[in-house]
Amino acid sequence: MTGRARDGTLSAVSFDLSVWALPDGATPEQVRAAVRQCRDGRHGEQHPDPRLVAFYRAITATYPDRPARPGTPWEVAPLHTAADHIEMKLHPTCPDQVLLDIERLAGEHDLMLFDGSSVYPPPARVRS
């Protein structure tokens, strides 16, 4: 992903992506409301959703976030984790495979994706 620097040249910018564990039937507006609550620093006191725990273990098994190290796709590590979501700030040069893996794992764990403006289910939701 690229953006414009003040001098008009193109510069790389990070890509933010989050996965959300909300009840079945959650609407895009409910996801956006949950994002707003997180950005306002409001996180409810609850146990992490098991779907997120499984997603986190799977994604960090392939792309570790602890300790932060060169060569991982994460621009910010460790990943921001909460009871109902995980936020991932990806390097601008992140390989497409990382995004494909995130989408695949989100589908396997029945999570919604939020890319900073759009809410969508993973391309191929897989239910066990």
Image: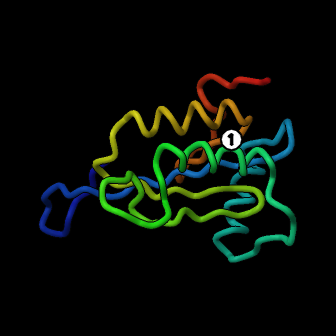
Quarter of the figure with residue 6: bottom left
Q: Where's residue 126, x and y in %?
A: 71, 23
| Residue that mark 1 sits on | 112
Residue at 76%, 47% (x, y): give it. 21
Say what amino acid the circle numbered 1 marks.
Met
Kind of element beneath mark 1: strand
Residue 61 vs residue 121: left or right?
A: left
Quarter of the figure with residue 7: bottom left
Residue at 42%, 66% (x, y): give it. 68
Q: Please, is residue 93 above or below residue 39 in the view?
A: above
Q: Where's residue 32, x and y in %?
A: 69, 54
Q: Please, is residue 55 above or below residue 100 in the view?
A: below
Residue 108 vs residue 87: left or right?
A: right
Residue 65 vs residue 125: left or right?
A: left
Which one is in front, 25 or 62? 62
Question: Which quarter of the figure is the C terminus placed in?
Answer: top right
Residue at 54%, 39% (x, y): give it. 102
Q: Where's residue 50, x and y in %?
A: 80, 48
Residue at 59%, 65% (x, y): give it. 80
Q: Please, is residue 107 above or below residue 64 in the view?
A: above
Which one is in front, 67 or 124? 67
